[in-house]
Image (cartoon, rainbow, N blue to C red):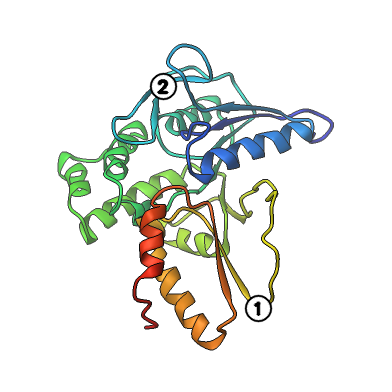
Amino acid sequence: MIDGRTVRIAHFCDSHPGRPDGVARSAEMTVRLLRAAGHDATLYRPGPLLGGDVRSVPVPFRQLRAGLPFRPRPADVVHIHSTGPIGMTGFRAAAGWGVPLVATWHTDLLAYADHFVEVPVGAAWCARRLELGWSIAEYLELTRPGAVRRRRLVELGKGMFARMAVAIAPSAKTADGFAVFEPTGDIRVLPTPVPAVAAVPARRGGNVVLSVGRFTAEKNPDLLLRAFARVRVARPAARLILLGVVRQRRRLARRIAGPRPVS
């Protein structure tokens, strides 16, 4: 509670339960912690087409569900965890209700655009929903990889950050990257809450490098493996532990079994 009253907080997340990413889990735990503290926290996220949370439809060939239009209940604070259809509803709701907008920046907008076709497509839709007033030529810049698209994505980021009262970064590195968007609101570094690991590998001596996350291209796993190869040269007993590798496990096994350059 704040000043003896319960705060109504509406959370908007485009990741559905069970999706292999940290966004859905982070949003769930944030809401759970706020409820435990006595606040009225509501989570809007994709659910089945018939019933559930926000009605949604699956995106073909992707582990995504697109939320359909819905009307959220008024709240004192809006907290968005993503910038898909549901997240954009949060942007517009905050503006319509005249309440502060808090955003946890989970996705590297600039880096992910080179790996996921839905990022530039979604960026165009976001610019439209935010009424940024882009021309057709400016929208088309999102189709051009490299510096042109990056410049247009930066402009989109500026439009988003201009509407945020608080931007939450999961790390200091992420917060430093906000500078390109020229944020006007408060920037806070708050590590993403995660549940405790049930089983911890037995310690056998030596140093341990722990990596938590997917083994997919946007995470640049080859950089991790090359760096660890250099660690092993100096510390042969060191071990690398990877948590969260669900997809591309065979590629990981082949990569580990293959040549291990140290430069």
Q: Position of residue 3 (x, y in %)?
A: 82, 35
**Which one is closest to the eye, mark 1 or mark 2?**
1
Q: Residue at x 48, y 75 (%)?
A: 228
Q: Residue 52: x percent and y percent?
A: 53, 17
**Vertically, is 248 above or below 62?**
below
Element under disc 2: strand
**Front position in the image: 258 or 43:** 258
Residue 56 has which mark? 2
Q: CA distance from mark 1 to mark 2?
A: 48 Å
Q: In this figure, which residue is indicated by the disc labeled 1? A: 206
Residue visible at 47% across and 39% down in the picture? 82
Left or right, 189 with respect to 15, comes to right
Residue 216 position within the rendered picture, expressed as x and y whole percent measured from the top left: 39, 54
Q: Quadrant of residue 61?
A: top left
Q: Residue furthest bottom?
A: 234
Q: Residue 92: name its quadrant.
A: top left
Work out whether mark 1 precedes mark 2 in sequence or the reverse, and give the earlier one: 2
